[in-house]
Amino acid sequence: MSRHDFFLLIGLVATALGWALTLVQLRRAWKISTEGIALATWLTFLYSTIFWIWYGAVIWNPIVFWSSLGIFPIQAVVVARLERRGQRRVFLETAGIVFLACGLSTMVFGWNGGCYGAGILMVVNRWPQIRKLIVSHEVEGVSVASWSLGFISLGLWAVYYVGQHQWAPSIASGVAAAGNVVIVVLAANRHRQHRQLARA
């Protein structure tokens, strides 16, 4: 296997895992519960995916482009399942934050700046989910498996971008993967507490 084929395979696996983890979250939100799923977090996922579609198209990286384009409608359906009544401010605020982090930074600093902005955003956008896990005991809608797959997927994306010599998105993906670890640990702990209370 050539070096090119190896990193292409990494990108394809990362894409498949990204789609799978979002489908897992969609199934959970659809059939089990939306409790514990933060609207702001998923809106930021949705809006930032537009940046990655744009990025993949401009540099013409088919893996990045098709991966992002494919995941966008799945994220949109997850958002559609969440409680949105009275949440117009959340929609507008998250759109503004994504524009500042990704759009404006790209305009000012170029694509590398946009990727670094996206990396910062990927850390910030996990905060509502982390905060919800800290303050709420009702976290049935948070899938440890989904966020764990997300960690693996983001780690693979970091490796893929290294293979493409694209350091900014590699660093952004690595930092986001660290945020996923925090969510996995908190969610697993909450689920464990819930099981202990159920047995008591």
Image (cartoon, helix red, strand yellow):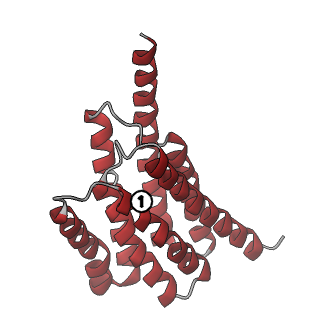
Residue 83 placement (x, y as % from top left): 28, 54
Q: Can the viewer see residue 169?
A: yes
Structural crowding at the residue carrying mark 1, measured as other residues with C-alpha within 10 Å and reported as few (<14), some (14–19) or many (≥20):
many
Looking at the figure, which quarter contains the N terminus?
A: bottom right
Helix, strand or loop under label 1: helix
Count the labels in the image. Answer: 1
Residue 38 placement (x, y as % from top left): 31, 51
Tell me which corner region of the image, top left, top right, bottom left or bottom right, holds residue 62.
bottom right
User: Residue visible at 33% across and 33% down?
Assistant: 138
Residue reaching furthest to the front: 31
User: Residue visible at 61% across and 68% down?
Assistant: 160
Q: Is residue 179 left or right of residue 135?
A: right
Kindly identify which residue carries mark 1: 78
Tell me which corner region of the image, top left, top right, bottom left or bottom right, holds residue 153.
bottom right
Residue 85 placement (x, y as % from top left): 20, 58
User: Residue visible at 29% across and 49% down?
Assistant: 127
Residue 187 placement (x, y as % from top left): 42, 36
Image height of 195 relative to 166, above or below: above
Amino acid type at mark 1: Val
